[in-house]
Image (cartoon, helix red, strand yellow):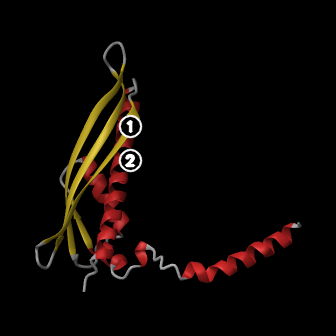
Amino acid sequence: MRNSTRTWLTALVAIGFAPTLAGCGFTPLYASPGVARGLPAIEVVAPAGRVAYLLREDLDDALGRDKSSKPAWRLNLTVVQTRDPRGLRLDNVAERYDLGLTVKYTLTDVTTGKVAHSGQVNSEVSYDAANAPYAGISARQDSQERVAGDAARRIQIELAAWLARHPRS
């Protein structure tokens, strides 16, 4: 079979299945009414510290925070970071570290002051310890950026799912 004939047959099969797929009821999460409108209206409040700052920045970006409008929701974060040594050498020095992050959050309605939703996400990344001081600092900072980004994505997904189930009137 020639390539042009195969391409036409593939296109015809795809067109034939299109009505079936359209009627399955699948709706993307961000297509739900109120979700896309609700995420940018969330103001993120994080505690002090580098990882908390990175998490707040990642969440502001992920939620599409519109700083020019008044927030409808306030997201308060509690951040607990752990750093555990792994792979100890004979001289009892770690070759790797696991960086863990536990983030508890509460979503509060700004107008009523009531907590509407709360949750917790956990994230963990690993990094190699380096003998050179700058390389060690760089590896640790990179792991902090990765763990904050992962936690932010998890929170974004949980908030989007919650907003899809609880549209605001």
Residue 81 point in image, percent of width and height: 24, 43
Tell me the residue at 32%/53% (across/down): 151
In the picture shown, does residue 56 fall above or below 134?
Answer: below
As rendered, which of 106 and 22 lies closer to the eye?
A: 22
User: Which corner quadrant holds the N terminus?
Assistant: bottom right
Mark number, residue 146: 2
**Which residue has dot 1 on it?**
126
Residue 93 point in image, percent of width and height: 32, 20
| Helix, strand or loop at mark 2 | helix
Mark number, residue 151: none
Quadrant assignment, res 119: bottom left
As rendered, which of 134 and 144 lies closer to the eye?
A: 144
**Other-residue count near label 2 (Cα within 10 Å), few / some / many at <14 / 14–19 / ≥20:** many
Residue type at mark 2: give it. Arg
Q: Earlier in the sequence, mark 1 or mark 2?
A: 1
Q: Is residue 10 left or right of residue 25?
A: right
Quadrant assignment, res 137: top left
In the picture shown, does residue 68 fall above or below 52?
Answer: below
Q: Is residue 159 left or right of residue 134?
A: left
As rendered, which of 71 and 97 lies closer to the eye?
A: 97
Residue type at mark 1: give it. Ser
Tell me the residue at 30%/67% (across/down): 159
